[in-house]
């Protein structure tokens, strides 16, 4: 029998568990200059906000040891231009298309979810809740289980497609947030978004980012992401999508063993746009070598050492 | 299709203590790249450094792409020790490149530091197309002599060329924009029907100065920014440029974001905004 890489998230059949991560893959078109993106299990768009955003001024990225900080500031084309300019391309894809949404109020989220989920070609909505909540003094929605649940309950009501909250790691108890959004009706969760960090230029005594703080990503965050994925996957029944520092097939195997049903790759594709294909290859090689016929056999397989 | 993969280094030329060139074998990049475009280079196995580094295409010959590099930090320091036969991970070519000038107009090329390789490529390309070297004025500046990317190559082109160094260790002492500004005023008063075309490439402060000097003239500037990806997906390189009427955004109206790696690195001086 052949090897099966198929996996399922919230009723969506993915031909393999490898997805692109939000904010690291644009709206998909750029990657077609390198490979056929239908080879992916799926792709996630940049966060869409109601209106276009130019984001923060430079410098908005800093390279750190085995990682990077970004304070891009949700630069995106906004809902209308997304529908006019980006959607037609996404509608032609045969891989799963997940649209990531972000807002400053619960209303923003429900409006976006209502409109975007009714568009043909959108298979699911990922909800970026690592955004300041304007209605409650600017604290991130994702920082409190109650606020996170409130947004997700509303989005769930408005959406016609599965809803996947993307959890922030910048919380005291990510499991509590995961359980809260599960209770609010989430169909799956993805984690982690970036970790808050900063860097200082000691020659100029200035922050290296115009925004002072940025989000850490890349191999540096992998152990943190892996631990959080394990904890969340052990505590909820809905599927978990693992994100954070993945750049090899072995990394993917670790996340699957920790309980993720699929993974997303972000930062690693900057240097290597075709990293997804290499990772799919390496995952297959691992499975064959270890006599697994089905990728699902390793999901949650980790045992105590 | 753009290239993404491992390539062999087929040659290395050390130009000075700080400057060197690497030849890489990539038919795919060689067949596509034009002056002003760049490639992203990563050293395999160096995992603590995440981003690839951008280098302008200096030259193309058959399947060989040449980049000229100034040693100035982590990756360029490691690249200095790369040798013939070693392999690099490369993606590209990226960016819009220069719009070639119409025949017969006088051309001013103004290069600071690592801005020289792409302008040399541009210069050689237009000379090859039959452009008269008499119409080309080449200004090239470096901090000191060991940071000069090329000298013999420049003089052998037969164009008017001026070299400056900040410390006077070679050529005229001072900033490259000074002799350029002087010469340009002279042309200005002449009768050049369409006017000159100016191309500038180098550090931000330098290209900004060129923009000021060239106010009202046709001027193209190539920008340097940090480039986490180079292929348009991270937005890390994006800068604000003047917008058309239709591009209002939530943050600020009248501006448009342009990715230096995709819509750039070459912009019309008149569309740039200097903060
Ligand atoms: C489109 C483009 C084309 C370029 N072409 C060439 C070229 O042909 N030859 C060449 O020698 N250099 C070129 N550069 C600059 C080159 O990319 C940087 O010098 C290089 O990335 C530094 O890497 P590093 O790891 O050695 O430096 P780091 O250790 O990362 O930093 C050392 C110093 O270099 C500066 N630096 C880092 N990245 C950049 C960057 N992207 N642009 C400008 N300065 C930077 C830093 O501010 C710092 O002061 C180009 C840059 C761009 C954006
Ligand atoms: C430049 C950049 C932009 C990002 N933009 C978004 C975004 O718009 N929405 C979002 O939910 N996550 C965003 N992320 C987070 C990633 O999707 C991912 O969760 C995180 O980077 C960790 O994965 P990685 O280490 O594989 O990059 C961004 C990350 C980076 C590096
Ligand atoms: S370097 Fe990533 S978008 Fe330009």
Image (cartoon, rainbow, N blue to C red):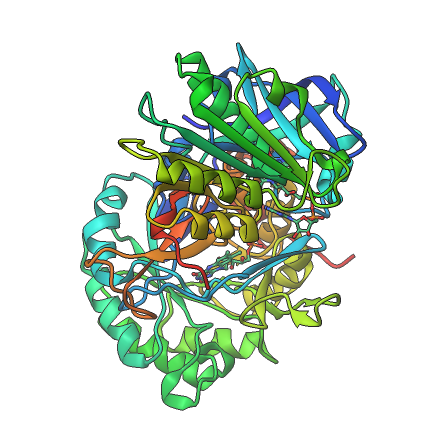
Where is residue A199 shown, x and y percent of the image? Answer: 67, 67
Q: Measuring from the top left, give residue A285's x and y in whole percent.
A: 61, 31
Is residue B34 in view? Answer: no
Closer to us: A8 or B42 = B42
Is any part of residue B62 visible from this angle?
yes
| Percent coordinates x, y for residue A281 in the rendering | 55, 31
Tell me where residue B106 sits by quadrant. top left
The answer to whether residue A240 is above or below residue B215 is: below
Name the residue: 42% across, 33% down: B97
Q: Who's the residue at 19% across and 58% down the image? A: B246
The image shows residue A83, relative to residue B196, as above or below, that is below
Report the front residue among B185 and B64: B185
- In the rendered image, the quadrant that contains the N terminus of chain B is top left
Describe residue B7's horizontal placement relative to residue B137 as left or right: right
Q: Nearer the viewer, residue A74 or A225?
A: A74
* Residue found at x 64% / y 33%: B163
Q: Is residue A296 left or right of residue B18?
A: left
């Amino acid at each position: 029998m052949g090897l099966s890489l198929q996996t399922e998230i919230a009723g969506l059949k993915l031909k393999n568990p490898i997805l692109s991560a939000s904010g690291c893959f644009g709206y998909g078109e750029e990657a077609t200059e390198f490979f056929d993106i239908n080879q992916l299990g799926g792709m996630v768009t940049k966060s869409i906000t109601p209106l276009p955003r130019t984001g923060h001024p430079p410098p908005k990225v800093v390279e750190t040891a085995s990682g990077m900080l970004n304070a891009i500031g949700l630069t995106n084309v906004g809902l209308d231009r997304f529908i006019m300019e980006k959607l037609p391309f996404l509608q032609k894809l045969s891989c799963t298309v997940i649209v990531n949404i972000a807002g400053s109020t619960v209303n923003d989220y429900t409006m976006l979810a209502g409109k975007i989920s009714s568009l043909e070609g959108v298979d699911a909505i990922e909800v970026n809740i690592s955004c300041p909540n304007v209605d409650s003094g600017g604290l991130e929605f994702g920082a409190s289980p109650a606020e996170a649940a409130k947004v997700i309950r509303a989005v769930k009501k408005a959406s016609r497609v599965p809803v996947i909250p993307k959890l922030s790691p910048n919380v005291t108890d990510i499991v509590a947030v995961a359980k809260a959004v599960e209770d609010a009706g989430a169909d799956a969760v993805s984690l982690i978004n970036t970790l808050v960090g900063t860097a200082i230029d000691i020659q100029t005594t200035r922050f290296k980012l115009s925004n002072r703080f940025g989000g850490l990503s890349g191999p540096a965050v992998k152990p943190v992401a892996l631990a959080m994925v394990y904890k969340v996957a052990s505590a909820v029944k809905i599927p978990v999508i693992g994100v954070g520092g993945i750049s090899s097939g072995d990394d993917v195997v670790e996340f699957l063993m920790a309980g993720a049903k699929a993974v997303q790759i972000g930062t690693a594709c900057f240097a290597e746009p075709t990293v997804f294909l290499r990772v799919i290859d390496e995952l297959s090689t691992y499975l064959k070598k270890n006599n697994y016929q089905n990728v699902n056999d390793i999901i949650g397989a980790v045992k105590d050492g | 299709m753009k290239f993404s993969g491992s390539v062999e280094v087929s040659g290395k030329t050390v130009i000075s203590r700080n400057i060197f060139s690497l030849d890489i074998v990539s038919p795919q990049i060689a067949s596509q790249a034009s002056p002003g475009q760049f490639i992203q280079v990563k050293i395999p196995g160096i995992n603590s450094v995440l981003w690839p580094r951008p280098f302008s295409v200096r030259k193309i010959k058959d399947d060989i792409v040449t980049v000229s590099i100034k040693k100035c930090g982590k990756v360029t320091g490691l690249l200095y020790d790369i040798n013939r036969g070693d392999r690099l991970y490369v993606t590209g070519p990226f960016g819009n490149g220069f719009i070639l000038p119409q025949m017969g107009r006088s051309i001013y090329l103004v290069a600071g530091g690592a801005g020289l390789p792409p302008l040399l490529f541009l210069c050689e390309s237009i000379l090859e197309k039959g452009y008269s070297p008499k119409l080309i004025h080449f200004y090239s500046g470096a901090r000191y002599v060991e940071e000069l990317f090329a000298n013999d190559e420049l003089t052998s082109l037969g164009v008017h060329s001026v070299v400056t160094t900040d410390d006077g260790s070679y050529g005229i002492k001072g900033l490259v924009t000074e002799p350029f500004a002087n010469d340009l005023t002279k042309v200005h008063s002449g009768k050049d029907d369409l006017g000159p075309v100016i191309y500038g490439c180098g550090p931000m402060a330098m290209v900004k100065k060129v923009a000021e000097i060239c106010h009202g003239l046709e001027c193209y500037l190539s920008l340097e920014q940090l480039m986490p990806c180079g292929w348009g997906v991270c937005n890390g390189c994006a800068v604000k440029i003047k917008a058309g009427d239709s591009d209002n955004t939530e943050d600020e109206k009248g501006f448009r974001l342009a990715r230096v790696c995709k819509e750039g690195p070459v912009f019309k001086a008149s569309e740039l905004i200097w903060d």
